[in-house]
Image (tube, rainbow, N blue to C red):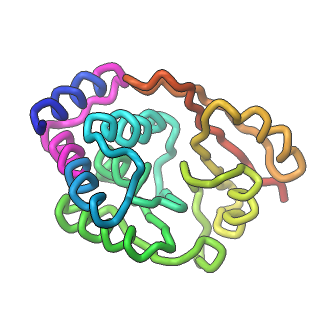
């Protein structure tokens, strides 16, 4: 299984035009194997097949990499570390703060950080509404929020004046965009190509109205 996962990932990275070293690819496969092992007790994801985890978790997360700016990224509602962990592996010179209020999931994240030696990852166990910072983030990303309006209302206090929100969404995104005209400006709607995934995926880039 390990070799099959590695081959699947290597092929897909070529399709994404994302050159990662052998060491980085090894970390990504180790991450999938950790999710698979911990999932039995911690129910981290509804996806049970490791090959599907590569597509639905790793590649889906990495597909947004061309659009993530340099600097510190806050991943809100990260769950088992998505998209934060794959991005942190891909960009070891950038810092990623992973936020989740679920203690089981943050325990898993500390294990991942330790096993994969991810010195560029910081883990925060709290709800986003209760999280406070002295300096706002230029980039806040999430693939977990139920709606764009909910994400904006929950995260806007954490943005820097020039900060953007990046929300990973699927086909129903256009209806959601109609509901946030008074909350945020649409900077870009990036259509994502995720190797092996036939569903349409989007990255919504927003600037909150003040």
Q: Does the magenta stretch include residue 27?
A: yes
Looking at this view, name the residue that lies furthest to the left.
3
Quarter that holds the C terminus = bottom right
**Where is residue 197 drawn, in percent x and y?**
43, 25
Q: Quadrant of residue 195?
A: top left
Q: Is residue 91 left or right of residue 72?
A: left
Can the viewer see residue 139? no
Task: Name the magenta segment's main secondary structure.
Answer: helix
Residue at position x 61%, y 67% in the image: 136
Q: In which quarter of the image is residue 94?
A: bottom left
Q: Nearer the viewer, residue 45 or 74?
A: 45
Q: Position of residue 50 (x, y in %)?
A: 26, 41
Residue 4's place in the image compared with 53, above or below, is above
159 on left or right of 87 = right
Looking at the image, the residue that sits furthest to the right is: 182
Magenta stretch holds residue 75: no
């Amino acid at each position: 299984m390990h070799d099959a996962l590695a081959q699947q990932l290597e092929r897909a990275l070529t399709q994404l035009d994302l050159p990662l070293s052998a060491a980085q690819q090894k970390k990504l496969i180790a991450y999938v194997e950790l999710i698979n092992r911990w999932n039995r007790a911690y129910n981290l994801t509804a996806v049970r097949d490791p090959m599907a985890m590569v597509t639905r978790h790793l590649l889906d997360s990495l597909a947004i990499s061309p659009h993530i700016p340099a600097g510190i990224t806050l991943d809100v509602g990260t769950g088992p570390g998505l998209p934060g962990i794959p991005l942190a592996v891909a960009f070891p010179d950038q810092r990623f703060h992973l936020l989740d209020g679920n203690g089981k999931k943050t325990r898993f994240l500390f294990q991942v950080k330790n096993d994969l030696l991810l010195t560029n990852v910081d883990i925060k166990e709290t709800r986003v509404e209760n999280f406070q910072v002295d300096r706002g983030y230029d980039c806040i990303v999430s693939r977990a929020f139920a709606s764009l309006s909910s994400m904006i209302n929950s995260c806007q206090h954490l943005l820097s004046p020039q900060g953007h929100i990046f929300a990973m969404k699927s086909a129903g995104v256009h209806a959601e965009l109609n509901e946030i005209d008074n909350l945020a400006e649409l900077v870009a709607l990036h259509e994502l190509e995720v190797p092996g995934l036939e569903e349409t995926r989007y990255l919504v880039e927003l600037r909150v109205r003040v």
